[in-house]
Image: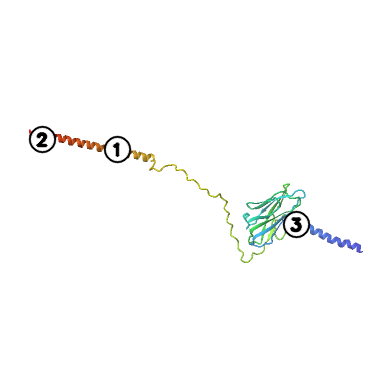
């Protein structure tokens, strides 16, 4: 009797374990995010992501993440990534891409967030891309305590620490500029009117010159006429005096 009971005892736990594995499988076959600083308004929080490789024939070569409200792309910086992968911020999030990983290998990376938002949780919708153009879309948000088929990574946040406040928006870093180089003064396109008069001032100067010359000649003529009149008057006076004396 004991040898018949023994398989039964073994069979039940095996069936239960198989059921647990089937139910738990989807929970691990997606992307996830964790952080030791999972608290609202936490500063410089490091987030660890893991995207499971679900293909037996192709490897992951890119991951795209949409950031939740309250986290700007400029607030995120790379900490670690697979070797050869490049971090690129985008309009709504960031991407990591590089040489394809081995089939079945997970893509693990870490980013630093300047400050987590004042929220109960943050959702990071993620696209996982493979070398054979396959795409896994982990973009569904859990609702009502049930996990969707393609759940997005969700990080639960504890309440903000007492006195924690939101940081001001970072000041944009000015783009580097070249060292100032003295700029030579432009060569003058015109010379002051005192040295080289313009056309209008030249015409004025010509008119004034003519006027000066005219006034000078008039003075000479007037003087000559005056001398001539004196001479004529003197001659007449002399003749009258001579006539009276005779």
Q: Which residue is mark 1?
A: 213
Secondary structure beneath dot 1 equals helix
Upstream in sequence: badge 3 or badge 1: 3
Identified at 12% across, 35% down, the residue is 238
- Outermost residue toward the right in this view: 1
Identified at 17% across, 36% down, the residue is 230
10 Å crowding of disc 1: few (<14), some (14-19), many (20+): few
Mark 2 and mark 3 in contact (Cβ < 8 Å)? Answer: no
Q: Position of residue 171 (x, y in %)?
A: 57, 56
* Closer to us: 88 or 174: 174
Q: Which residue is mark 3?
A: 28
Upstream in sequence: badge 3 or badge 2: 3
Image quarter where the N terminus lies is bottom right
Q: Position of residue 209 (x, y in %)?
A: 32, 39
Viewer-side label of 3, 1: 1
Gap in angstroms between the C-alphas marked 1 and 2: 43 Å
* Closer to us: 20 or 187: 187
Identified at 83% across, 59% down, the residue is 15
Identified at 30% across, 39% down, the residue is 212
Q: Position of residue 229 (x, y in %)?
A: 18, 36
């Amino acid at each position: 009797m004991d040898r018949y009971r023994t398989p039964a005892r073994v069979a039940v736990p095996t069936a239960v374990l198989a059921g647990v594995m089937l139910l738990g499988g989807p929970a691990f076959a997606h992307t996830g995010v964790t952080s030791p600083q999972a608290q609202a308004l936490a500063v410089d929080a490091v987030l660890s992501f893991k995207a499971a490789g679900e293909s037996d024939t192709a490897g992951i070569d890119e991951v795209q993440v949409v950031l939740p409200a309250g986290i700007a792309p400029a607030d995120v910086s790379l900490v670690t990534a697979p070797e050869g992968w490049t971090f690129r911020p985008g309009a709504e999030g960031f991407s990591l891409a590089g040489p394809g990983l081995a089939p079945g290998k997970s893509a693990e990376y870490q980013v630093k967030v300047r400050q987590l938002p004042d929220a109960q949780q943050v959702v990071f919708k993620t696209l996982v891309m493979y070398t054979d153009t396959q795409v896994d879309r982990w973009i569904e948000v859990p609702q009502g305590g049930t996990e969707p088929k393609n759940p997005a990574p969700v990080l639960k946040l504890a309440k903000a620490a007492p006195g924690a406040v939101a940081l001001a928006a970072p000041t944009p870093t000015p783009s580097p500029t070249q060292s100032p180089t003295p700029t030579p003064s432009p060569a003058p396109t015109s010379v002051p009117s005192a040295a080289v008069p313009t056309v209008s001032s030249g015409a004025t100067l010509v008119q004034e010159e003519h006027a000066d010359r005219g006034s000078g000649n008039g003075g000479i003529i007037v003087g000559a006429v005056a001398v001539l009149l004196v001479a004529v008057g003197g001659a007449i006076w002399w003749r009258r005096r001579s006539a009276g004396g005779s």
